[in-house]
Each structure stands twice: as C-alpha cells, then as structure tokens.
Image (tube, grey):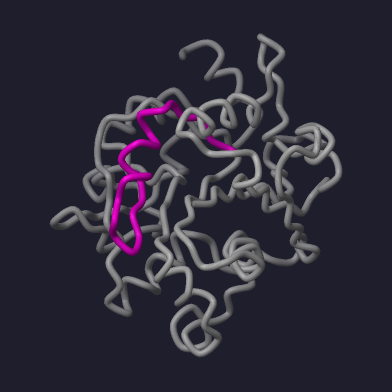
Amino acid sequence: MKVIILCAGLGSRTGLDYPKSLFKFNDQECLIEKNIKTIKKMGVKNKDIIFATGFKHNMIKNYTYNKFSYIKNSSYSSTNMVYTLLNTMNKIQNQDVIVIYADIIFDLNCLKSVFKSKFKITTLVDKEWLNKWRLKKNFNQDLEELVIKKNKIIKIGKKTRKINKIDGRYVGITKFNKDMMQLLKNKTFLKKVVKNHRNIDFTNLFMRLIDSNIDINIVYKKLNWFEFDNKDDFMIYENNF
C-alpha cells in the first residue's frame, strides 16, 4: 500500500509564501511532521509515502530530508488536485493507495478504518463536524452539501448555507483499492467519466464517479481532526485542541 500526500497547491488563502503543510506550531513541529508520525504508526514505510508536490517542490523535499518519494506536478499553477493525483497515480504500480490532503491534521483513529476497508473507494466523514467549524470565522461561507444514504455518499461538494443538507464533513482521507487505481489510469474511462480532469477538485471527482454508478463508501464517525484553510485556522487549532 502507498500513501499519497497531496501538497501541490499554492495555499494562497493562508498568505504564506511557503506550503501550508510546513507551517510550524508553537511546539516548533510543522504540520507535515505531525502527520507523518501518525501515518507511520500504521506501519507505513518511508518508501511507501509519496508527496505529490508542485509549489515549492524542493522546499518540501528539503524539509522532509528527502526521506520519501516525491512526484511533482509541474503544471500545479494551472491545474487542480485531481490532476495532481492522477499524475502521481500514473507513475506508480496498481495497488491500494491512501490519499491524504496535506492541509489537515488527524489522529490514528482517523486512519485505522480507512486502511482496513476492502471497498473500491472509501472516504472518511466526520459526523460531528459542526462544533469544529463554528470555531472558524464566517464558517457558514465554507459549507458544502454532503448527503449520505446507506453508508454511501450520494451528493457532495455543492456550496450551501443549509446545515440540514450536510450529513457530515468530508475530511480529505480516501482509500482507492488497486482495481479503482487501474480504472483511474484508463484513458477511455477518464475521457468518458472524469472529463476535463485538469481543473476539478476531489468532491467534483466523487460526483462524477457517483453519476457513473461507482459507490463512494464512507467511514462515518466522530473524529479528532482539523482543516487549515487560512492562517487564522492555525491559531484556532493552537487555542482549542
């Protein structure tokens, strides 16, 4: 199994001139260091952790002491995370992969059930997300529809102001098994189902798969995690968790 950490983006909302995964907390440990420690508790070896980079590629390599694998999306400034993901997948063998956003923090409990899943696609959903989001400024401007039926996502990603249309919060930790990996590498499938994958995000990918009758299974529970969209979020985390 491989773990792909998506860290190609500019993270412009943070106002930082470096990848937000390298933000240092008060304990002088950066976000990516904390997450690598958690990932390695699952028994993942250094060689099986892949950084899908773009912006400040060499800075990420240097900060992580070049201990891992690194695959750069050279078109990071004009593409979105699905392009980064597929660019990375195309350069590794078909096997189970865990894909993790670089701008979240999570504990071991967030990984265990996803790692064990045998479904083609399994993603993590926080059922008690609202208490976390209410700590954020103008949190209602960052709400996305997510509808669950029979432990599967049937709608995701559309902007909403209606809390009752949100069954949970998509975390950014997803497992694709090797069969799904093979399918995502298939050019005919990409052209027919994913389409224009240069500029779509993860939730858009999920909806296109759902519309093609591919299940997005979920692990749905109360979770200890947080997402960093802007610089204030780092302060919120330091003060509340």
User: Looking at the picture, does residue 4 appear above or below residue 82?
Assistant: above
- The x, y position of residue 109, in whole percent, is 35, 29
Q: Quadrant of residue 91?
A: bottom right
Residue drawn at x 61%, y 50% as measured from the top left: 6
User: Looking at the picture, does residue 48 appear above or below residue 186?
Assistant: above
- 41 or 146, which is in the foreground? 41
User: Looking at the picture, does residue 19 appear above or below residue 120?
Assistant: above
Q: Quadrant of residue 119?
A: bottom left
* In-image side of 189 versus 48 (left or right): left
Residue drawn at x 56%, y 30% as measured from the top left: 35
Disc count in the image?
A: 0
* In-image side of 59 versus 108 (left or right): right
- The x, y position of residue 227, in whole percent, is 51, 34
**Residue 107 magenta-drawn?**
yes
Residue drawn at x 35%, y 36% as measured from the top left: 112
- The x, y position of residue 15, in whole percent, is 75, 35
- 181 or 9, which is in the foreground? 181
In the displayed orientation, state which residue is furthest to the left. Answer: 150
- 26 or 96, which is in the foreground? 96
Q: Quadrant of residue 208?
A: bottom left
- The x, y position of residue 126, in whole percent, is 32, 37
Image: magenta residue range = 103-124
**Residue 126 magenta-drawn?**
no
* In-image side of 208 versus 49 (left or right): left
Residue drawn at x 41%, y 31% as measured from the top left: 133
